[in-house]
Amino acid sequence: MDFNSDQWLNDRRLELVNLMFTQELGIRDFKNTAAIINYDDLQSPQLIKSFDKYRKALRAFFGADEVRSLLDYYYIEKDKKPLLNLLKQILKCYGYKFSRVSEYQGNFGGNKLYKSRYTIVKSNSKQENDDETTEVDITEESFDNTTEELPRPAELPRPEELPRPEELPAELPRPAELPAELPRPAELPAELPVELPEELPAELPEELPRPEELPRLEEPIDIDIDIDILEKM
């Protein structure tokens, strides 16, 4: 037996993966199973802790570039769905993937609730595996058993705030009746009297002379007054 052969290493790796699926999920052969795995189970703290004990052994057969969830940074610290992503990455190494079915559970207070289940199926192509890699990004936000708040316009009231039909008045109030005719100002005379001079000068001076421009009398005027006449008066 050649312990250095790739075949021997691959067999031991497959045995470890099957042991992990058998002990923790009850799946003896993940390549040939119709088992259904609930998302709630994969998020169980107890099950996440149980799978954690396999990571050290898995690091002997898988590289961090293949299964990055083997690193503590992802599995323990960063990832919100560590077990789900760990299993997805391992299945991808064998050409398999999780097929998800999400059942709509209803709308509660404006939130949509889903319940997700997974089955293991074979990937059809390399491109499909590449798509799966994008899906399992640790920053992925999916609706697995989470609530998704419906977008609401900021100015619209919520349905529970709207009045019920029985609460609406039978007749809407109407504005006060407007008068048929609006009050008018006092009547103005039809024609205003206008008096104009009979004759107007043919030409009017453009500008009248100012007082300082008028001629002044510079020499005294001699007036002869008869004193006799004054005395008789």
Image: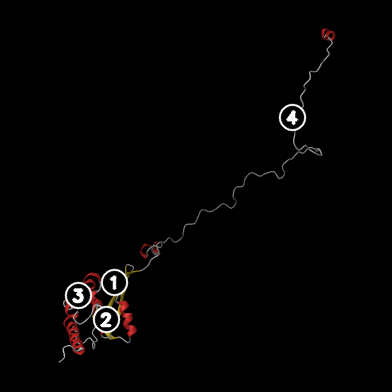
Front residue of this view, candidates 160 and 3: 3
Where disc 2 sits, the SS reads strand
> What is the x, y in percent for residue 84?
25, 77
> What is the x, y in percent for residue 120?
26, 84
Disc 2 or disc 4, which is closer to the eye?
A: 4
How far is mark 3 from mark 2, CA to CA? 17 Å
Looking at the picture, which amino acid does disc 4 mark?
Glu
Indicate the quadrant containing the N terminus: top left, top right, bottom left or bottom right.
bottom left
Residue at numbered disc 4? 213
Residue at numbered disc 3? 48
Q: Residue at x 38, y 64 (%)?
A: 164
Looking at the picture, which amino acid does disc 2 mark?
Tyr
Q: Are marks 2 and 4 in contact (CB under 8 Å)?
A: no
Residue at numbered disc 1? 146
Front residue of this view, candidates 219 and 211: 219
Residue at numbered disc 2? 118
Q: Against 191, is 10 above or below?
A: below
Where disc 3 sits, the SS reads helix
Residue at the far bottom in the pictured view:
1
